Structure formats: C-alpha cells, structure tokens
Amino acid sequence: MPNGPDAPPPPWLTSLTRNPVFWLFLLLIPAAAANLTYMAVQCASPQDTSSPESLTIHLALKVAAGGPLYSDFRVFPFIVTPYGPLLYEKLGLTARLFSWNAESLFLFGRILLLACALGIAVLLFFSATSETQAESSRAIAPLLFLSCAILYPWACTCRPDVMAAFLAFAGFLVYLKAGGRGWRFTSVLLFLAAFLAKQSAVAAPAALIFWNIINRRGREALRLACLWLAALFLAFVAMHVVTGGMSTLNIIGSNAAPMEARNVRLVGALFFQAAALPLILAAAGAAAQGWRSAGVSYLFVSLAWALFSSAKLGSNVNYFIEPLAAACLLAPSALEALRKNRSRVAGALIAGAAAVLLLPSLSYRINALETLKFDRDEQARSAVNSTRGLVLTDIPRLALAGRTPILIEPLPLSYLENAGRWNSAPLLDLMDKGGVSLVVLTSPVEQASTWQGLTRLPKSVLNKIREKYGLQMRLGDRFFYVPKGVEANP
C-alpha cells in the first residue's frame, strides 16, 4: 500500500470526514479547550471566583489546626458550615500535611475540583466506548461536557459541587457496568461519599431505584434503597453524635432557605441556554434508547431534582452539573443511531445547530482569556489586615484577610434572618460597643447589592451600619466605613 504524498487517506479518516457528526467533533474540540483553558487560568485568581469559596478555605484551615469543623453559627464568629465534611476534611488534611497557607490551599482546592470535572469526562468517554466503536461518537460525550459554560466557576472553585457530582456519577456507572452484589456495595459507598461532599447529591441513587421500579425489579429497588438510606442514616447519626449536634444544625439548619418559583425560572433558564446542545442530543439519545433505559431515568430524575432544588433562595446553576453529565451520557446513542441510519440531512442539521450554539460561546471564552486581568485587591487587603479590631465585610476573600475572620459568607444568614432562624442581636450589640472597627462593602450601604432579592449582608446589619458608621474612603468598587466620629482619610 503506498505511503507517499499521493497515498489515499486511511479508511477510518474517510469514513469520519463523510460523516457530518465528525464536524460536530471538530467544533467541540476548540470549545472544550477554550473552556478548560479559561478555568485552568482562573485557578490562579487571587480573588474568589464568581462564587464565594473563602469560607471553604477558612474551614479547611480550621480543621488543619485541630479545630472543630461544625460550630454554632448563631454566636460569634457567626461562621456557617453548609455542607458535609468530605471536602473540608480533605483540604484540611492536605494543608496540615504540607503546612500550606490559604493561598496554596486555594490553588490546590481549585485544581482538585477541576480534576473532578475531568474525571466526569473520563467516565463519559469509557461509558461511550462500551456502546459504540465510532471514533467520533464516543469522543462527543466528554467534549460536550467540558465545553459547557455552566462548568465555570464550579469546576475551578473551592466548593463541593463538582466533587459530589463526580462521586455520584461514578456510583451510577459502577452500579450499571460492574454487576454483582459486591459492586452494589461499592456504588452505595460512592453515593454516601457524594452525600458527605454535598447533601443534595441524591439524584443518582434515586434514579437507579426509579429505573428498577419501572422495569419491574421491585426487590432490587428495595434492596438498593435500604442499603443507601441505611448508610445515610448511620453517617448522619454518627456526625450528629460526634459534633454534639452541630453538624445537623449547620447542614440542615443553615440551608433552610425559602423556596420561590422565580428562582427556578432564573436559574433554569441559565442552564437550558448554556446546555442546549447536550440537551438536544440527550432527547435524541433518549428516543434511541427507549424511556425504560437507566440513562433516561438518570436524566429525568436528576433534572427534576435540580429544578426543584434550584427553587431555594440563593441557588445557581451548580445544581445542574449532574443533569449535564446525564445528558452527555445519552448523546453517543443519538449520534450512533444517526451514523447507522446514514441520515446526512439530520447530521447536517445537528452540525449546523452545534455551530450556532458553540461558536458564540467559543468567541466569548477566547475574548475573556484575551482580556482577563486579575485584581489582587492589595490596597483593600492591606487596609483589612492592618485593622486591629474586627472587620465586617460582604466580600469573603477580604473577610479571610482579617485578623479574626467573622461572618465570612453572610448570604445564608440573610435568608435565615428573614425566616426567623438567625438572630442578629449578638452582632448588632458587638457593633454598638465598637467591637467592629471597619466595614467593607461591595456597594454603598444605601444601595446594597442583591442576589435573587437578598442583600449580601442581613438587612438588620445594614441598618446598623447606616446608623453607626460613615464612609471613610472608596477603593475601586470597595466602600470602607468606620464608626462615626472617626476622622476620614482623604
């Protein structure tokens, strides 16, 4: 067979280039690469990403120093621990092992979470290889996942969302692919680990129970449900006893937020817009597999749970990482059906839709990379660090820079105050007595910034700032307030 410049291309390449799905593959490579590059660069950001993460680092350092992970957030220093212990303990153990400071732990935590996102992509690839041998089809699922815009910032921020999704997704695939009683226990352990990372990570086992029921395997559904619920119950009781009830107060009590339909509309719209292509392919894949398949059950249950959970005040698209993985899991079936049916029109439509949906996102990511500049906020950090008294701020990274960090992530306390589950009186009394020497806000106290109608600091605290504090100076979008009567700097 000739190997010179006039030699024909190999058969596999000819087959791919004649397949419109191949062009989808080519579109997804730069989209995924740009998204990954952007998140990798963001790992080195000196600020919190667009989601607060300083609280995670503070709690991990507290664990590293031998302190308790869970404490009463109703008393000073008003620190909430909203999730299970897995990520905090892992980061704390690493910090203690290597004697890391906060900056090193930020970088490690972000890389760890980005590795979890890559782990989901690897699982998607190997799941696809068991269903199809088409080179283009089996690479689509991980590329679809990695190119989706909702991964930022959750896949490069020190929060447990992606870790929980990775563990739950792994448990789902282990249950389906491995078989046997021993592997069932392994999947339950992975589901338990996902729950201990983030307590809302329950969609994968629930989907498997639902799948067993609709396929008339009631005994297996009951067996799995009993194993999983028993594991959760024992873990929860053990944590409650060991922490003197503080784990329950934090994990349940601090997440008792109001549920509002408008939040579903806001957050759901962001997800459906960003994940339009995976969802289109998932719908076609569901038709190819049939509604009784495990993948369809996973997508249905995880999406329904995400939509319900996103009604929680303060929610965001992090609730939809598992539905995204479930959608990508179904995509190879759609593409394989297309390849076998040789429908060039349908393939061309999919490739065209992909171009329409991916190219703007790709352009945005490239532009974001070209214009990205990190604000190290050195003046603000220096001002906070040099303040001898307590510093109150709605900026988590600045709260971490204080000598005694308090109220590091205040948004949960805003809705807890509204629900009557947190009393600001101890903090207000501290402010009345001059215990808070400096207040730093992201907006003027008269025009406090909000998210889903919530102010970043509880309203009673903002009212106290208006009463007792005056504007000292402004550094960019940082507003510094000191007790009234203290001379302001020019």
Image (spheres, rainbow, N blue to C red):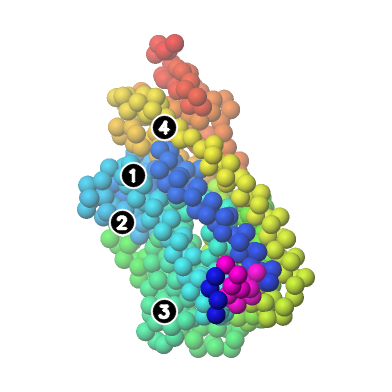
In terms of sequence position, does the residue under pointer 1 or pointer 2 come before the other? 1
Q: Name the element at disc 3.
A: helix
Residue 426 pos. (x, y %): 38, 35
Closest to the observer, 470 or 402: 402
Q: Name the element at disc 2.
A: helix
Discs 2, 3 touching: Cβ within 8 Å: no
Three-letter residue code for mark 3: Leu
Three-letter residue code for mark 1: His
Where, by quadrant of the figure, is residue 85 drawn? bottom left
Residue that label 4 marks: 376
Three-letter residue code for mark 4: Arg
At 50% from the left and 24% from the top, the residue drawn is 476
Residue that label 3 marks: 227
Residue 477 pos. (x, y %): 51, 27
Q: Which mark is residue 58?
A: 1
Residue 111 pos. (x, y %): 39, 53
At 68% from the left and 81% from the top, the residue drawn is 340
- Horizontally, is 294 left or right of 439 in the view? right
Residue 320 visible in the picture? no
Residue that label 2 marks: 89
Relative vertical location of residue 310 with respect to residue 418 in this rendering, above or below: below
User: Cα distance, mark 4 to mark 2?
Assistant: 28 Å
* 20 within the magenta span: no
* 13 within the magenta span: yes
